[in-house]
Image (tube, rainbow, N blue to C red):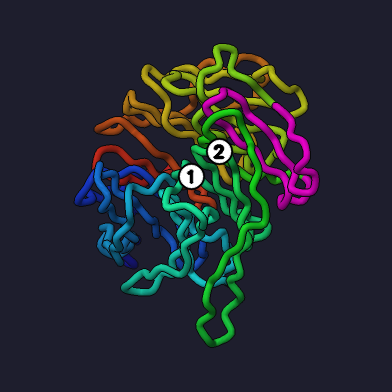
Amino acid sequence: MASLPPKRKEIYKYEAPWTLYSMNWSVRPDKRFRLAVGSFVEEYNNKVQIVSLNEETSEFEARSTFDHPYPTTKIMWIPDSKGVFQDLVATSGDYLRVWRVGETDTRLECLLNNNKNSDFCAPLTSFDWNEVDPNLLGTSSIDTTCTIWGLETGQMLGRVNMVTGHVKTQLIAHDKEVYDIAFSRAGGGRDMFASVGADGSVRMFDLRHLEHSTIIYEDPQHHPLLRLAWNKQDPNYLSTMAMDSFEVIILDVRVPCTPVARLNNHRACVNGIAWAPHSSCHICTAADDHQALIWDIQQMPRAIEDPILAYTADGEINHIQWASTQPDWIAICYNNCLEILRV
């Protein structure tokens, strides 16, 4: 009688040598269960580690570890779901850096700095990598600006191509610090993006008409907005959260300034938001109350009372990512732990 394959576990855990902050899933189809994680050490020397799940031993293994100045505010892999580009990962901190990932080592390909005239840099709070055009990245900074970068990567032609980048445009996006930026899938998915910041507003921009922006929402108390995330399937919806807030706000760009839903079951401040890659009505939120909650928002604009799934971690969850090419899996970070959860 043939033996049944071992049942896959629902949770896999990796313990890093340091407190974790940023983290993200690799997108390439040939690199399942591979993530990059960044340390949070309150000094100059920090680390980024590439880890992957060994599906035979059910253990995470560190593939490579490299030095990073200051903690990474965000990590993203090139959004290359077909595996045609070079294997790149980007990080933001003092600057935007693009790294080439090898089997055993990771090396810096380019450092993108648009402030060549000064010894001082304005730290980057976040960035986003455009899914439709992987040669476009956008960064947000504490100096009130967003910068759109053009990347020259070139496809693999049997030789190693150097990666270089240039500033396509820089704009003053907010009245105060900008805390997050995200490209929208609307209108072809290349030209629209939104940002949030310390002035408490969500603003939307179009690369073809940068002379004006649209304010989609303003926090009534002018509390800083820390994160925003676009719905992956319906570009009319996005979510945001205010600093120290226990709730996540869902917005509809067709109805500016009025939230269509508030997700407020968390008992401590929310740290992360991730929309389902494959469904327009599912979103996951994570908070200092140790909980990751999955919500079904189909009932909007009727009130969304309770999440449909809840997971309690062993610490305050500071980061959450839903795997775009493996929609059954969500990753969370707390303390020095990375966990991937089957949903």
Give the mark, 2 or 1, whose residue is nearer the N terminus: 2
Question: Pointer 2: residues within 10 angstroms few (<14), some, or many (20+)?
Answer: many
Per the image, is 191 magenta? Answer: yes
Question: For the point 56% across and 18% down, which residue is it?
Answer: 262
Give residue 164's position: percent from left, percent from top.
Answer: 55, 69
Give the alpha-carbon distance from disc 2 to disc 1, as whole Å.
7 Å
Q: Nearer the viewer, residue 312 or 128?
A: 128
| SS category of the residue bearing label 2 | strand
Q: Quadrant of the N terminus?
A: bottom left
Q: Quadrant of residue 280?
A: top right
Which residue sits furthest left? 17
Label 2 amino acid?
Trp
Q: Quadrant of the C terminus?
A: top left
Magenta segment: 187-215
Give residue 303's position: percent from left, percent from top.
Answer: 61, 14
Q: Is residue 161 above or below residue 48?
A: below
Q: Quadrant of residue 310?
A: top left
Question: For the point 28% across and 58% down, which residue is it?
Answer: 60
Q: Nearer the viewer, residue 224 or 113?
A: 113
Question: For the point 46% across and 31% down, which residue is it?
Answer: 285
The residue that disc 1 covers is 322
Mark number displayed over residue 275: 2
In the displayed structure image, the side of residue 201 where residue 55 appears, left or right: left
- Check whether the beta carbons of the residues at disc 2 and disc 1 lie within 8 A of each other: yes
Per the image, is 83 magenta? Answer: no
Give residue 39's position: percent from left, percent from top.
Answer: 29, 48
Question: For the point 41% across and 69% down, which residue is it?
Answer: 101
In the displayed structure image, the side of residue 177 where residue 12 appears, left or right: left
Q: Quadrant of residue 22?
A: top left
